Image: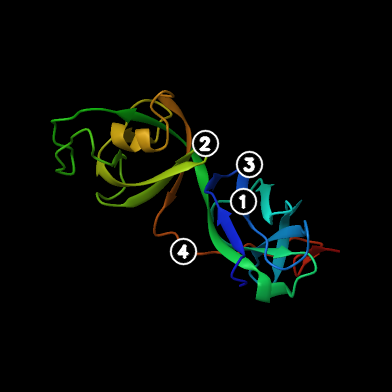
Amino acid sequence: MAEDSLLVARPGIVGQQLTFTGIAGGSARRPRVEIQIAQSDGSWARIARTRAHSSGAFKATWRPTQSGRFSVRAIPAGSAGAQEAATATVSVLRRTVATWYDQAGSTTACGVELDKATLGVAHKSLPCGTELEFAFRGRSVTAPVIDRGPYAKGVSYDLTIAAAEKIGFVSTGRGTVGVLPVATPLSAPAPAPGIAAGHRR
């Protein structure tokens, strides 16, 4: 990867727009940049395309259709290909409904003493200590399962107030967030029909 190349992939949620930012390497002025995702057959498929600013900075968006962790890269048009590609791992979280709670001073079902700074989440059945990544409006937080619940209809997770604050969810109270187990390994989607080596046929 060129020293001045950079790709930053913010976590996203299935079906919602995800943003890539970065710096395009190479000497071309305002190059077109392709964002590509690694495929299960070892090829790369284009998922976004944009034009960089004269400074080399670029921004591109993608609307993912499946959750997981994926290898992505940014290649400036006219570059030497993989040699100048900036790479990153992007987390795509599945949609779920969550709430938050504040019971500072109490002890959870997993034996954790809660205070205002405790990062954690309640779930009905996941083992205590399971690490989960949550995302909301481009912000993310990692929190372990420390309690049982929630028991409100249609709600799957109950974040502590500290975890909710990390992703700006407190004012929402109840809503759709993204969730993905931290232990989720890298995966690669199967090549889509008509797409090969990062280019549409």
Density class for disc 4 (Cα within 10 Å; few <14, some 14-19, many ≥20) is few
Residue hosting label 4: 185
Quarter of the image for the N terminus: give it.
bottom right
Q: CA distance from mark 2 to mark 3?
A: 10 Å
Q: Look at the numbered discs 3 and 1 and tell me whether their residues touch, using CB distance below 8 Å.
A: no
Compared to residue 139, the image places residue 131 above or below, namely: below
Q: Amino acid at mark 2?
A: Arg
Q: Nearer the viewer, residue 43 or 116?
A: 116
Q: Amino acid at mark 4?
A: Pro
Q: Is residue 121 left or right of residue 53?
A: left
Q: CA distance from mark 1 to mark 4?
A: 21 Å
Residue hosting label 3: 17
Residue hosting label 2: 137
Q: CA distance from mark 4 to mark 3?
A: 22 Å
Among the two numbered marks 1 and 4 on one chain, the one whose residue lies closer to the N terminus: 1
Compared to residue 123, the image places residue 42 above or below, namely: below
Q: Look at the numbered discs 1 and 4 and tell me whether their residues touch, using CB distance below 8 Å.
A: no
Q: Residue at x 28, y 42 (%)?
A: 120
The circle on residue 20 is: 1
Q: Residue at x 63, y 69 (%)?
A: 40
Quadrant of the image occupied by residue 117? top left
Q: Look at the numbered discs 4 and 2 and tell me whether their residues touch, using CB distance below 8 Å.
A: no
Task: Please provide percent x and percent y for residue 6.
Answer: 59, 61
Q: Nearer the viewer, mark 2 or mark 1?
A: 1
Q: Nearer the viewer, mark 4 or mark 2?
A: 2
Total tally of numbered discs in the picture: 4
Q: Nearer the viewer, mark 3 or mark 1?
A: 1
Is label 3 in a helix, a strand or a loop?
loop
Q: CA distance from mark 4 to mark 2?
A: 23 Å
Quarter of the image for the C terminus: give it.
bottom right
Q: Amino acid at mark 1?
A: Phe
